[in-house]
Amino acid sequence: MTGVCSTRHADVVRRLGAGQVIDYARQDFTAGAARYDLALQLGGTYSPAAVRKVLTPCGTLIQSFGDGSRWLGPVGNIIKAVALNPFAGQTLKSFTAKVTTQVLTEVSDLIQSRRIIPVIDRTFPLADAAAAVRLVEEGSPAGKVIVVVEPSPPELPPR
C-alpha cells in the first residue's frame, strides 16, 4: 500500500500500514511510473483524470471527496469521474457514507473490539469548540478532531 500525504503526516500513514509514503509537496505521485489497481482518494485536489494516469487499465478510483473547484467544491470531481467513466476502461466511483444508527453501532463495535483503531489528532471540550474548528480550517490535522459534548458519567462502584 502506498500513502500520499504531507511530510508531517508520514508517520501516521506508515502506522496505518503504508509500505511507501509519497510526500505530495515534494513529488507528484501522478507523474510516477507506479501503477495501482485501486486508488482511494479521501481528500485532496487531484482530479479524476490525474489519478487515472496511475491506475492499471482495469484499475478503480474511489473518491470520498476532494477539494474540487471554487464553484462546485467536491461535486465537481465527482461529476468529472461520472463523465469519464464510460470512456475510461477503469472504474471511477464516488463514495458517500450513509450514517445510520445501525452503521454507527457497527463502527462502535469494531472500535471497541480494536479491529479498527481511529486516528485522533486532538480532543476538545465543548467550551473550546471554536478552537477545534480553527484547527480543522487552518490545516489538515493528523486524524479526527473530537469535540466532547458532555463528559462521561463517572463509573459507579460495584454493589
Image (cartoon, grey):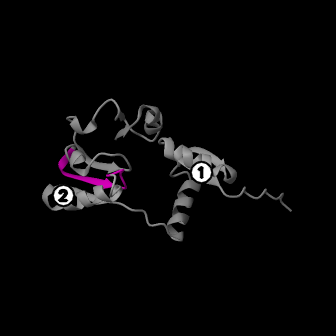
Q: Residue at x 43, y 39 (%)?
A: 13
Residue type at mark 1: give it.
Answer: Ile
Q: Quadrant of the C terminus?
A: bottom right
Question: Residue 99, percent across and down?
Answer: 48, 66
Q: Please, which residue is most extreme toward the top here?
A: 26
Q: Nearer the viewer, residue 96 or 34?
A: 96
Quadrant of the image occupied by residue 80: bottom left
Q: Which amino acid, mark 2? A: Leu
* Horizontal side, residue 38 vs residue 112: left or right: left
Residue 133 percent across, percent down from the top left: 56, 49
Q: Is residue 75 visible?
A: yes
Nearest the camera: 96 or 83?
A: 83
Residue pointed to by mark 1: 146
Q: Earlier in the sequence, mark 2 or mark 1?
A: 2
Label disc, if present, on residue 84 of the rendered structure: 2
Magenta stretch: helix, strand or loop mostly: strand
Residue at the spot 53% in from the left edge and 64% down from the top edge: 104
Q: Which residues are magenta?
A: 55-69
